[in-house]
Amino acid sequence: MARTRPGGANESASALSSPLPPPSRRALIGWLLGVTRPVLAPLVGSTLCRIADLLLGCAIMAIGAVAVVRAGAQAASGAHIGIPWDLAGQLALASLLKAALRYGEQFLGHFVAFKALELLRGEIFAALIPRAPRVMLEARSGDLLARATKDVDRIEVFFAHTFAPAVSAVVVPLSVVGVVGATTSWPVALTALAFLVAAIGVVPALGWRASLASSRRAVVERAGLTQHVTDSIQGMAEVVGYGRAEERLEEMGAIDRAIQAAGAPARRWTALRRGGAQLLALAGPAAMILVGADGVRAGAFSAAALAGGVAAVVRLAETARGVEELAAALNASFAAAERVWATAHSPIEVVDGQGELARAGSHELVWEGVSYAYPGSPKLALDDVSVRAAAGRWTCLVGVSGSGKTTMGHLALRFDDPAAGRILLDGVDIRGLRGDCLRREVALVSQSAHLFRASVLDNLRLAAPGASEEEARRACQDAGIHDDIEALESGYGTMIGERGASLSGGQRQRLALARALLARPGVIVLDEFTSHLDPALDARVRSRVRERLAGTTVVEITHRLQWVGGADHVAVLDGGRVVEQGTPAALMSAGGALARLVAREG
Ligand SMILES: Nc1ncnc2c1ncn2[C@@H]1O[C@H](COP(=O)(O)OP(=O)(O)OP(=O)(O)O)[C@@H](O)[C@H]1O
């Protein structure tokens, strides 16, 4: 059973409106690796390739330096400078191998990154399913979009540019230092190690906390920008129509400036760390020469060996740079991962029950003492509402705008659960029913039903995948949309544009109605289902729908009071409360709330 919230206001914490406390870094990494377990093997492969590639890079530099020093010594002694075939051969072999390893690292690395993105997107989508549609009551759609797209993209950095550089940043310098120590001198090797530890281990950690806090703020601001852009694009007609383009642009500019300001500390630390790491990484080789000079003079090791070691350590500066860049990108990546994590771990507020409900032509639907407040809202949208929609009858919910009619419909489909009271289907609390079973038996034709970028037929079959074309056609005839569809270029095969843009509001509404009729639910909630239709079409559609739905439980939410007389039962809402209910005739003759609404409508 789902949790009920006491009192009116909904105080539940949501991962979207009030984020969960961020997870520890360990927990976050553990989660990321858990989600992306299938890519761990190629990730290790890519890392090994990178380590070998970097080591070969150092070896090539060292071989080159040895060759130059040897040639210098030969020139100084007046000997003939021959081509060092041994070193040239080693260089050629190492170069070829390096190229192959580079290919392997890039190939595997990109495979890992893209596969990881796919897995993470799957994870966030899977997390939304049990949280929908409730999550839509509170989430700003742009914010959800940002989490599923931009934030997930930013996490790519973790896989593509974190694991392999981090492991190689430890393994490669230690290996080079070990080789220098074993082949040349340990004091020289340890000198290099001291500078490398400072450049790779200490400097990248400077300002870590401040950078992370700054990145977190920037990620949130960026999500705000996505929200703003989504709003502006979806509402382009209103923005342009009301001459608000300049204002929207200014607002966007202000959000941009907020993003810049939020990210400024992170950028300052990044610049400082980059400079520091480079300075240390290049000061190391100079220190090696100072420490090793005496050894060369004393003949403890050759100048060529020292030069080889120094050249290899110079090459390690690249590793230091890689780690530094990683530290900067990683903050943004972790800040994004925290948001995706929060979505995936937000509490599931509406938990499916286990109960079944047999398929039937109609069910009784009862709201029993239902109170409800939207997430984050202090105000009750429904206050102790009790209405019985009898099986097979037509019940109308009427009332002024904002009185709570749509909310009653949404709760009947468990968009959320009431804070108090129950909703019963054939006497069974819907919280105890399986979600798919409830949605099979109760259908909603909402004011803004979504149509997908797919053919008309596919949009219809969303509700009843097994329906034949003939059944779909009949449902469309009953919804009064069949002739409009036949007039389209490819009839039922016509692709509907994004968000059904190629259809008019009234056509979209009737298509959504046909979709619900096709599913043959036992209860159908019709929310202003003819609001876009002219009176003549409204009358025609109603008469067909009435015929088709004879014997089905219908709950109609409407402002069109001229049709209320045909209902079996009417409930009048005001301010979230039922102010009167009964048969339309009884209510009209009582001269109460319904009569006043009708009189007001004229
Ligand atoms: N997602 C939401 N978040 C917060 N409050 C909401 C939300 N949706 C609706 N409300 C509030 O709940 C109350 C009831 O809204 P509801 O949509 O149920 O009214 P309605 O009677 O269907 O209105 P209309 O006839 O205009 O569709 C209103 O005060 C509204 O502002």
Image (cartoon, helix red, strand yellow):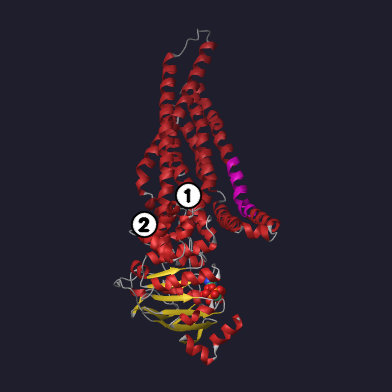
Query: Given this view, does label 2 or label 1 mark the residue nearer the observer?
Result: 2
Please tell me whether residue 267 is drawn above or below residue 241 in the rendered image.
Answer: above
Above or below, 585 relative to 278: below
The answer to whether residue 451 of the structure is visible from this angle is no
Amino acid type of the residue tagged 1 in the rendering: Ile
Q: Which mark is residue 469?
A: 2
- Residue occupied by mark 1: 155
Q: Is residue 501 above or below residue 139?
A: above
User: Real-space Cα distance between discs 2 and 1?
Assistant: 44 Å
**Is label 2's Cβ within 8 Å of ligand 1?**
no
Q: Is residue 270 magenta?
A: yes
Q: Position of residue 208 (x, y in %)?
A: 54, 51
* Quarter of image, ligand 1: bottom right
Residue depicted at 41% across the width and 40% down the height? 111
In percent of the image, x 43 and y 44: which residue is there? 114
Span of residues in magenta: 259-275
In what quadrant of the picture does the N terminus appear? Answer: bottom left
Counting from the top left corner in percent of width and height, residue 102 is at 44, 32
Secondary structure category for the residue under label 1: helix
Residue 538 on the magenta span: no
Q: Quadrant of the C terminus?
A: bottom right
Of the pair 442 and 407, the residue shown nearer to us: 442
